[in-house]
Amino acid sequence: MRRCAIGLIGWGTVGGGVLDILHRDAAMLRDRVGLDLRVSRIVTRTPGRLPASAAHGGGVSSDIADITGDPTIDVVVHAVGGTGAAKDLLLACLAAGKPVVTANKALIAEHGDELFAAAAAAGVPIAFEAAVAGGIPVIAALRDGLVANRIDAIHAILNGTCNYILTMMEQAEQDFAEALAAAQGLGYAEADPTLDIDGTDTAHKLAILARIAAAAAVPVSAIRVEGIQAITSDDIASAARLGCRIKLIATARRTTAGLDLHVAPTLVPLDHPLAAVMRNHNGVFVEASNAGPQLFTGQGAGALPTASAVLADVVDVLIGRAAATSRHFSLFAGGTQPRTVGEAEEITGSYARFLVPDRSGVLAGIARILGDRGISVQSLHQDRPAADGRAIIEVLTHPSRGGDFLAAVAAIDAAGLTAKPTVTLRRL
Ligand code: HSE
């Protein structure tokens, strides 16, 4: 039996989950992979809060040198958030020749090039399954199981907090703030939940998926991101009338012009597999060139699901699989980057809900502006007049250039045809 020592940095949701799983399931892992896994050292800013018995051998401290300088530590679990001190800690471990497993998506997404270069220089891997879609082994699936495929598109629900909020708004008729508070209480949300609801957390995960699926080291700033902060119960009701649900969808898609990457609230038809992904679950819908379409779904946030992914990476590192497979994906290569298409080039079906004065000529005005800009209407619905003499006009368009559609909507608002700024959504 091979004894393996883990150094754990960080004592939060993820670190606690790793200790819980090892406490309960170390014997199962021993039987299954022949490794006797122990956390032998925990480094945290608040060591006083932990009993020394939390780590085997009593190693709880606040000094990273207790991990980097300990030759008995085989692998480091880096369970620290943020991109400041967290980056220095990760680099220190690599410099000390320690393989690192991290759950920190912001760090991998924003500093991946630097970190992977440092890992290559040190000759050790960085593994990051837990950074995307929590407990779902989607990095391993893309990297290993789908290695014989070109990945043509990924459409994914990657933030448990947003999916939980949208589910609760639809099914429990909660308002946005109530649903967000519940998601925070359940441990799904980031320390700053703005990063969840404004789409930033989803964009970080999309950048990592693009790295794996398309060998694209895309800066997060190149991804167009809209969050769910403006979604109201009216939008949820409109989606239901159209036979759809609203989901925050991250898209990575190969187009003839380049790589289309965006995050946006999107109408998902109820018969699409992603529509069934509810509560805090994540879903990653992959269009693979040979295997065909596949959906990966499960818990995308929370202590045990995330720690499950961390420990899968620990095993991968210790049996040598992390180092072998990461070479396949140009993680370190400065090869040709796929071009990222701009909003003006994106082709997307769209939806708009116009609140208008209920009088003649308004519908014609909207139709003329859409038509002048080459936007083809697929269907149009006008609701009964609201009590104040206004009407709601909903338009679904055929695929068009996303920039043209948004420009048309802006022109409609600017022409004074609408009573308030128009709501738009993408369509899957
Ligand atoms: N805040 C994230 C979520 C946690 O809600 O999905 C996992 O990254």
Image (cartoon, rainbow, N blue to C red):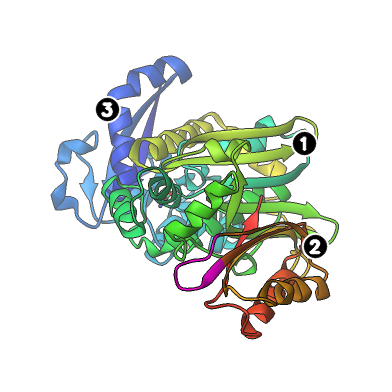
Q: Magenta part of the protein: which range?
A: 384-391
Q: For the residue marked with disc 2, what is the amino acid?
A: Ser
Would residue 236 be visible to someone looking at this image?
yes
- Between 348 and 321, the residue placed more toward the observer is 348
Q: Check disc 1 and report its element: helix, strand or loop.
A: loop
Residue bearing the label numbered 1: 149
Residue bearing the label numbered 2: 376
Q: x, y percentage for residue 152? A: 76, 45
Q: Check disc 3 and report its element: helix, strand or loop.
A: helix
Tell me the quadrant of the picture where the N terminus can be found: top left
* Labels 3 and 1: the sequence-earlier one: 3
Q: Is residue 71 magenta?
A: no
The residue depicted at 34 percent of the width and 18 percent of the height is: 27
Residue bearing the label numbered 3: 23
Please name which of the two marks, 1 or 2, marks the residue nearer to the observer: 2
Q: For the residue marked with disc 1, what is the amino acid?
A: Asn
Q: x, y percentage for residue 54? A: 20, 37
